[in-house]
Amino acid sequence: MPVGPRLRARPLPAPLRVVLVEPEIPPNTGAAARTCAATGSSLHLVGPLGFRVDERAVRRAGLDYWPLVDVHQHGDLPAFEAAFPEARLHLFAAGATRSYLDADVRPGDALVFGKESVGLGADVLAAYPERVYAIPTLGPVRSLNLSNAVAVVVFEQLRRLGALDEAFMADDAVRKG
């Protein structure tokens, strides 16, 4: 594949924070991590994970872009909130009644997604009822795959925040992936 300039955009003054609560499926987390690397967003893994993210496991999974991701691990959601008190939480759940297009996201805010099997816990959703959103679907499926949902929400929020308005061609050192 030819290597040359790529279409780029300028990063936000404060990155979006993608928060995955108890993710279970390594490829979903890997794909979300790639979205974070591509958008300058930080990735926060919360609670027990359904897999390992040590250097050996990441290398075996072929995640050659993992070093490009700003990854943080937190024991639980309150620990994330304590570490980043300025980040407003926006929760995404398949059963929400408000569209993700209604989310009032600002740079530095947290986009919170639940585990693949059951989503976010009822206690978390109840703590922020005015900040729970869903991605509407047109077909009969219940929801999107976790990594797809992350990509949809992150890129829409970047678009709404104007981060994609001034795209430019850049010849940079990022060649893999």
Image (cartoon, rainbow, N blue to C red):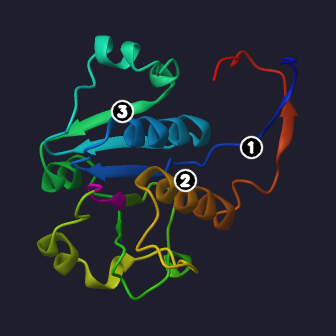
Give the residue type that dot 2 points to: Ala
For marks 2 and 1, the one nearer the N-term is 1
Look at 27% across and 46% down and name the residue there: 23
Vertically, is 30 above or below 160? above
SS assignment at label 3: strand
Q: Report the side of 52 relative to 26 (left or right).
A: left
Q: Main secondary structure of the magenta part?
A: loop
Front: mark 3 or 2: 2
Which range is magenta?
112-116
Front: mark 2 or 1: 2
How many numbered marks, from 0 up?
A: 3
Look at 30% across and 17% down and name the residue there: 57
SS assignment at label 1: loop
Determine if the magenta segment contains residue 82: no
Q: Report the side of 1 relative to 115 (left or right).
A: right
What's the distance in space between the residues labelled 3 and 2, CA to CA? 17 Å
Position of the C terminus by quadrant: top right
Q: Residue 151 carries which label?
A: 2
Kindly indicate whether the residue at mark 1 contacts the one at mark 2 (C-beta within 8 angstroms). Answer: no
Vertically, is 151 above or below 168? below
| Residue highlighted by disc 3 | 71
